[in-house]
Image: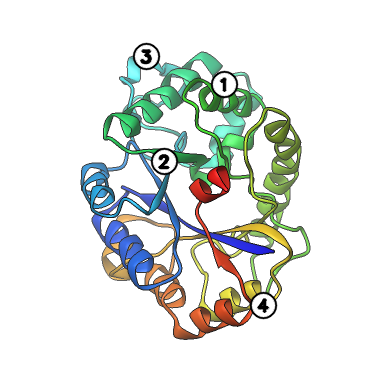
Amino acid sequence: MKQLIVNADDFGLHESINHGIIEGYTKGCITSTSLMAGGPAFEHAAGLAAKHPQLGIGVHLTLVGGLPVSEPHCISSLVDGNGMFCGSYASLFRKIGTSGICLRDVQCELTAQVEKVLAAGINVTHLDSHQHMHVVPGIFDVVLRIAKKYHIPAMRIPAEPLLFLGGFKPTAGRIIGRTGLSVLANLAHFRARRAGIVVPDHFYGMVAGGSMDESLLLNIIDNLPEGVSEVMVHPGFDDTKLNAAFSWGYHWQQELSALTSGQVAKLLEYRGIRLVSFAQLITK
């Protein structure tokens, strides 16, 4: 049997992203999303979540980009002089490599993020992370402990097949980054399952992160392997507004169009692919 989780990242980051995710859920193939506890539009996202209780919602653990949930003085190794996280995973890796990160600070901050989401009345279905930092050795141990402590039974494992492009033409830098993270994710996959955490069998969406289009999504669906797959997406409304707020060069509206495409819906039905969320994997 082929089952597919379509998970939209960055819920809570911006109201235009929040609205795009809900549009993709109500009118498209999104089944799940990941909420950023420290996102500027967190309260807006939590309000939308309350109106759509069947939408699976995980915690998008964040250690790079933006503001923490904890007071900066409590997690000093994770923030700069302005109380902000590192701007990218590369800068976080540099800090880790020079022993500049205290894992107690990681535990404190990620725990605070999970507790904030739970306090909003949300039934957390899974854990994943911004820029996939949860699979980094050391950080992954912290995330496993948090999953166990708060009885969060599932997790993303972003191990995209190393030879998969699906027609997308990524930069060399993106290929290198995807390769490194996929290797770490494959190592995390075994440990997560050994710890009793539910994880999908396959993952797609990293190499084309922020640039998913209808053609690529159709290609993924048409060649979906047996088992449970997760596709990561980043939908939103108003590219002009979002590109003014974020420098990532994402194509939010393009992704939303793909997710609400009639062709995508028809192919899912034709291939007999069952759309599920992480919650359905846990209770099946």
**Mark 1 vs mark 4: which is more N-terminal?**
1
Query: Which element type, helix, strand or loop, lies under badge 2?
Result: loop
- Label 2 environment density (alpha carbons within 10 Å; few <14, some 14–19, many ≥20): some
Whole-angstrom CA distance, mark 4 to mark 2, is: 35 Å
Whole-angstrom CA distance, mark 1 to mark 4, is: 37 Å
Residue highlighted by disc 3: 74
Is label 4 or label 2 in front?
4
Residue highlighted by disc 1: 145
Residue highlighted by disc 4: 222
Q: In terms of depth relative to the viewer, which is nearer, 283 or 255?
A: 283
Q: Are marks 3 and 4 in contact (CB under 8 Å)?
A: no
Residue at 39% from the left image edge and 26% from the top image edge:
80
Q: Position of residue 237 (x, y in %)?
A: 30, 68
Note whether residue 266 is visible.
Answer: yes
Compared with 223, 196 (above or below) is: above
Which three-letter amino acid code belongs to the residue tagged 3? Answer: Cys
- Label 1 environment density (alpha carbons within 10 Å; few <14, some 14–19, many ≥20): some
Query: Which element type, helix, strand or loop, lies under badge 1?
Result: helix
Disc ID at residue 65? 2
Which three-letter amino acid code belongs to the residue tagged 2? Answer: Gly
Q: Are marks 4 and 2 in contact (CB under 8 Å)?
A: no
Residue at 61% from the left image edge and 33% from the top image edge:
93
**Residue furthest front in the image:** 284
Disc ID at residue 49? none
Compared with 187, 105 (above or below) is: above
**Mark 4 vs mark 2: which is more N-terminal?**
2
